[in-house]
Amino acid sequence: MNREEIFEKLTSIFRDVFDDDTIEIAEDTTAADIEDWDSLTHIMLLSAVEDGFGIRFDMKAVQGLKDVGAMADLIAGQPAR
């Protein structure tokens, strides 16, 4: 899966989790950019991303995520389960 495909799928997941069809994400999107992105929603988002991509994140790696671009990097480097 290339980066464009990852971002298309991530956009769909973000829109579903936040129940907002207008959300647009970019490499530098952070929790500060999305109004309802709090700690609980973050956990729901990570779970939805894992399910959507068929992967499991290492919690240590997830703690270091600074933006959506870093999340895409993490997704690209994950083996499918």
Image: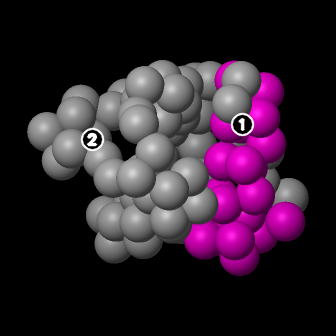
Quick check: can you spot residue 68?
yes
Quick check: can you spot residue 41?
no
Which residue type carries mark 2? Answer: Val
Image coords of residue 25 (percent x, y): 71, 39
Relative to 75, 39 lies left or right: left
Q: Residue 5: say if magenta.
A: yes
How far separated are the C-alphas under marks 2 and 1? 17 Å
Relative to 68, 39 lies left or right: left
Who is closer to the viewer here, 31 or 65? 65
Q: Quadrant of residue 38?
A: bottom left
Verify CB contact (< 8 Å) between mark 2 and mark 1: no
Q: Which structural element holds mark 1?
A: helix
Q: Which residue is mark 1?
A: 7
Q: Main secondary structure of the magenta part?
A: helix
Relative to 60, 66 lies left or right: right
Task: Give the mark nearest the N terminus, 2 or 1.
Answer: 1
Q: How is the image coloured?
A: one colour
Task: Estimate how packed mark 1 is, as few (under 14), some (14 to 19) or many (20 or more) residues with alpha carbons within 10 Å.
Answer: some
Q: Quadrant of residue 58?
A: top left
Task: Estimate how packed mark 2 is, as few (under 14), some (14 to 19) or many (20 or more) residues with alpha carbons within 10 Å.
Answer: few
Q: Residue at x 41, y 37 (%)?
A: 79
Residue at the outermost right position:
22
**What are the residue bounds of the magenta stretch?**
3-21
Which residue type carries mark 1? Answer: Phe
Q: Which residue is mark 2?
A: 62
Q: Residue at x 40, y 34 (%)?
A: 78
